[in-house]
Image: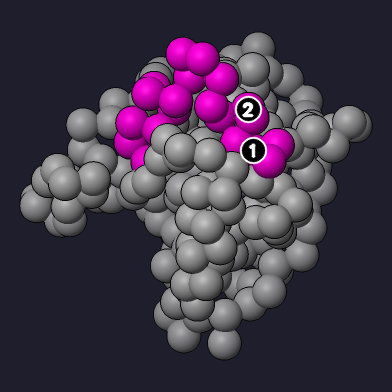
Amino acid sequence: MIPEVPTLTGRFITLTPLDPVSDSPALFDISHTPGVPEALWRWMPAGPFADVEAMRQYFQNWQANPDVRAFTVRTLPDGQPVGSISLMSIRPPHGVAELGNIWYAPSVQRTKVNTEANFLLLRHCFETLGYRRMEWKCNALNAPSRQAALRLGYRFEGIFRQHMIVKGQNRDTAWFSIIDQEWAKTGQALAHWLYEDDSQALGSLTRLGEGTASSAP
């Protein structure tokens, strides 16, 4: 049975289950300002959208997938929507899920927002649900997403060639994962960087769990 995931609250953000009707207007506004859509939606499976209604319909269809739990990311303390992240490809019998369909308004990119969103969902899946493996997948050409995965402590597993067609184009997919036996060290590194000391590059902290102190992107 696919688990229902509650609102998850951190220090910088809160993750609330995405409501297509009430959340779409604000999410559309922050993601369709002049100069934003092309870069923000380039690697996403859909978008940019013609209007709020088109985005609402997309979210509604996305939420209808039985193995998806989507969230609106809101900053604290104001509760303003700044993006979205999904728990997807959820496979409870195997204890496996993926974090994806992730995007943020330009105003919070390169902040702690995405790091904490991933941390909250990874912690929930590993520590509350008892999952064994969490995945991250992206277009193999999407260098920022690949760097983000490594920075967050995911390990690169390889390329699935001609994995799918997205927006009419071939997509080779880069696969990354964190497994349960790695989570204690990876989670500790994420929490340390988020809440105690961010003077050291996060990638160097998460890679310490692999037995190396070399810098990460």
Residue at far right of view: 77
Q: What residue type is labelled 1?
A: Leu
Point out residue 53 in the picture as x, y percentages from the top left corner: 57, 49
- Span of residues in magenta: 25-44
Whether residue 23 can be seen here = yes
Which residue is the site of mark 1? 27
Contact, mark 2 vs mark 1 (Cβ under 8 Å): yes
The correct choice, above or below, for 63 with respect to 155 in the image is below
**13 left or right of 89?**
right
> How many marks do you count on the picture?
2
Mark 1 Cα within 10 Å, few/some/many (few <14, many 20+)? many
- Alpha carbons under labels 2 and 1: distance apart: 5 Å
Quadrant assignment, res 200: top right
Observer-nearest residue: 34 or 163? 34
Q: Which amino acid does label 2 sit on?
A: Ile
- Most frequent secondary structure within the magenta stretch: helix
Observer-nearest residue: 4 or 168? 168
Q: Is residue 42 magenta?
A: yes
Whether residue 155 can be seen here = no
In the picture, which quadrant includes the C terminus?
A: top left
Q: Does the magenta stretch include residue 63?
A: no
Point out residue 108 in the picture as x, y percentages from the top left corner: 64, 22
What's the residue at 37%, 23% (across, down)?
Answer: 38
What's the residue at 9%, 52% (across, down)?
Answer: 162
What's the residue at 73%, 20% (across, down)?
Answer: 197
Observer-nearest residue: 106 or 177? 106
Which residue is the site of mark 2? 30
- Element at badge 1? helix
Q: Which colour scheme is used?
A: one colour
The correct choice, above or below, for 78 with respect to 117 in the image is above
What's the residue at 48%, 19% (across, down)?
Answer: 36
Residue at far left of view: 162
